[in-house]
Amino acid sequence: MQPDILFQTLAFRNLSVKNRVFRSNISGRFDNYDGSGTQARINWELKFARGGVGAIISSFVPVSIRGRILPNYATIHRDEAIPFWRRLGEQVHDHDCRYILQLSHAGRQQDAGGVENLGKKALSSTSRTESFHGFQCSAMTTAEIKSTIQDFAAGARRARTAGLDGIELHGANGYLITQFLSSGINDRRDEYGGSLENRARFVLEVVRAIRQEVGADFHLQMKISAVDDNNAVIPWEKRGNTLEDSIQICQWLEAAGVDAIHVSAGSLFPHPRNPMGGFPAEDVLRAYDSIISSGLYTLRNFLLLSSPPGRMIFRLLWKRAQGKIIEGVNVTNARAIKQAVTVPVICTGGFQTASVIRRVISAGDCDAVSIARSLIANPDLVQIFASGQDRPSNPCTYCNKCLVNVLENPLGCYEVSRFGGDYDAMIREVMSVFETTGFE
Ligand SMILES: Cc1cc2nc3c(=O)[nH]c(=O)nc-3n(C[C@H](O)[C@H](O)[C@H](O)COP(=O)(O)O)c2cc1C
């Protein structure tokens, strides 16, 4: 009998992972306001380590306070963070699971900067106001670019010192690295803007600075939006990078020392194609009020969402911009990138069925998949697959309620139908991360 590809080890240049299912980047506002981590985050990650995923890729971890999306996410912006990440990594390792930390900077895509950033414009590649929420920003000076590159390098050093298994650059979904890469966002006229080569300069300098800091033998991967599709949501925006642009960027990244590519989509977050699924307008309305003061158009959006016709418009626009496939939505792009690089490729987007995952890996479309929402719904998904079941009996509905609640609530599955309509049972599950086993 052929060995099951799902459970075969994946060997990167500097890292070995026991199977082909990675937990994709997700977490909630579990931590302290100052960026110090809590037992709740560790409990959250342990759900998936126990459930059998080969590796966990952390959520957005800011390399500086200026670069965070929301407060109450653990950061890696100072050496004092190292013991927390070490403790988290050790507990994840107890379950034979690897831990990859996502080094991130929001750029202008900052939902709530927090009191430390009050009165400071977010730093970006551009000074152009973001067009959906109206987040204001200021184009980085060369000195700010150089110091942000050093923030990424210092974050990488801290992750390595903490004994973690690798790092991922958040170069996807519209955050700072995308703001440099994207032809639809980057309007600079200096050596960091204009041609593709110039737009890629920032991320390539980040990679080189990281390699200088941590050496060549520490796993480094990059999450990239293969296609920007800026205009899928905002028709008057420029379309942004094409697949061909991204393929070239991935080849440069590989040459600069990146060990794997993680393929995503869209140059803002969320985006109708990321994560693919529903637009839970009532949940959006409940959570969106918390960021009304963050952007020039947030109040407009909130008022539109407050009226049934407005909600209908949002739903229609969201649906119109989606394709039909949810499971494996990025597979075609992952395949094209895989054909152009020699490092392994991880594909994110909708995976929930063992036979589908087996098929895409066996076909050579990617080497592994990363899963977010279906693991929120069933953290033991890999064990479900190992027991021979092709799909969980109580699957993720792709409603996206987890996603929109994250603005102000603890992350978890907020689809009450999955709990037989029992709201209290759903909240008990959401709150289970706060059980303080191991708290010092
Ligand atoms: C609640 C939530 C939070 C997320 N946070 C991040 C993040 O911090 N960094 C990131 O790269 N992607 C983030 N994502 C995107 C996921 O990692 C994943 O790539 C995307 O949801 C598609 O996978 P899925 O269809 O399995 O959910 C988030 C998604 C969700 C639903």
Image (cartoon, rainbow, N blue to C red):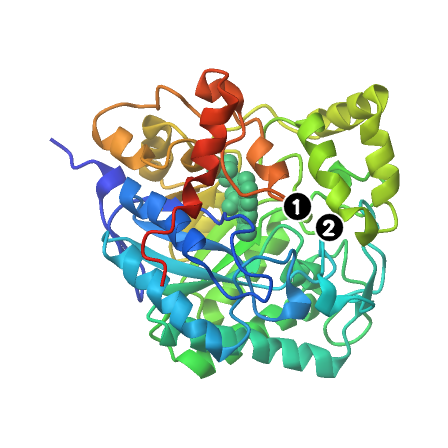
Name the one closer to the observer, 262 or 406. 406
Q: Which mark is residue 336?
A: none
Q: Position of residue 161 (x, y in %)?
A: 37, 76
Near mark 2 (Cα within 10 A), the count class, few <14, some 14-19 or many ≥20, is: some
Q: Is residue 435 visible?
A: yes
Of the residues shown, which amino acid type is indicated by label 1? Phe
Please tell me in which quadrant of the rendered image residue 343 appears: bottom left
Name the one closer to the observer, 194 or 230. 230
Q: Which mark is residue 240?
A: 2
Q: Position of residue 257 (x, y in %)?
A: 44, 71
Q: Position of residue 178 (x, y in %)?
A: 65, 58
Q: Earlier in the sequence, mark 2 or mark 1?
A: 2
Report the residue at 34% width, 49% height from top.
46
Report the residue at 45% width, 21% height from top.
419
Q: Which mark is residue 269?
A: 1
On the rendered image, what quadrant is the C terminus found in?
bottom left
Report the residue at 71% width, 30% height from top.
321
Is ligand 1 within 8 Å of the beta carbon of the residue shown at mark 1?
A: yes
Of the residues shown, which amino acid type is indicated by label 2? Gly
As drawn, the residue found furthest toward the left would be 1
